[in-house]
Image: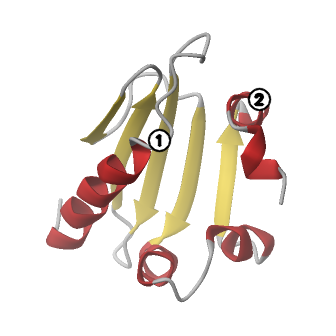
Amino acid sequence: MGIDEMEWVSELQNNLFLYASPNLDEELTIQYEVANSDGSIEGFYCVIGATTETSSGAAESPDVVFSLNKETAVLIHRGELTSEEAFLKGLLRLSGNVERLIDAFPSFSQK
């Protein structure tokens, strides 16, 4: 894992404390897959429940997977592109049980 990815994982962990909730019925595992220009995939994941945990690598059984290329990840990280814009432009893909993500965090779908 490169320096950028370590910084992203650390920043993600800090931000996830805002979403920890003892009200979640079960933990939610979210996997991020970032494709490098050479075709390799960098992965990290977070587990959200009463507490949060972020780790590099692949989750054993993620509920939701976010997939994007490194260019897009860098733009989002720098604040030059929102994740919503990336999704609408087809630069960020979601797979898995997206409904569970929306149910766990209804504010994500309401503006």
Q: Which quadrant would the C terminus be assigned to in this image?
A: bottom right
Q: Which quadrant would the N terminus be assigned to in this image?
A: bottom left
For disc 2, the marked residue is 103
In the rendered image of this protein, does residue 4 appear above or below residue 48? below
Q: Quadrant of residue 40?
A: bottom left
In the rendered image of this protein, does residue 42 appear above or below residue 107? below
In the rendered image of this protein, does residue 89 appear above or below residue 25? below
Q: Residues within 10 Å of mark 2 (few under 14, many from 20)?
A: few
Residue at 64% x, 65% y is 92
Residue at 73% x, 50% y is 108
Q: Is residue 10 left or right of residue 33?
A: left
Q: Is residue 95 left or right of residue 77?
A: right
User: Residue 1 or 6: which is nearer the viewer?
Assistant: 6
Q: Quadrant of residue 45?
A: top left
Residue type of the residue flagged with mark 1: Gln
Residue at 60% x, 16% y is 23
Q: Is residue 77 left or right of residue 111?
A: left
**Secondary structure of the residue carrying numbered label 1:** strand
Residue 46 in the image, given as x and y percentages of width and height:
40, 37
Cα–Cα gap, marks 2 and 1: 17 Å
Residue 31: mark: 1
- Figure colour scheme: secondary structure
Residue 35 in the image, given as x and y percentages of width and height:
43, 66
Residue 3 in the image, given as x and y percentages of width and height:
15, 70
Q: Quadrant of residue 68?
A: bottom right
Q: Residues within 10 Å of mark 1 (few under 14, many from 20)?
A: many
User: Residue 81 or 41: which is nearer the viewer?
Assistant: 81
In the rendered image of this protein, does residue 17 appear above or below residue 39? above
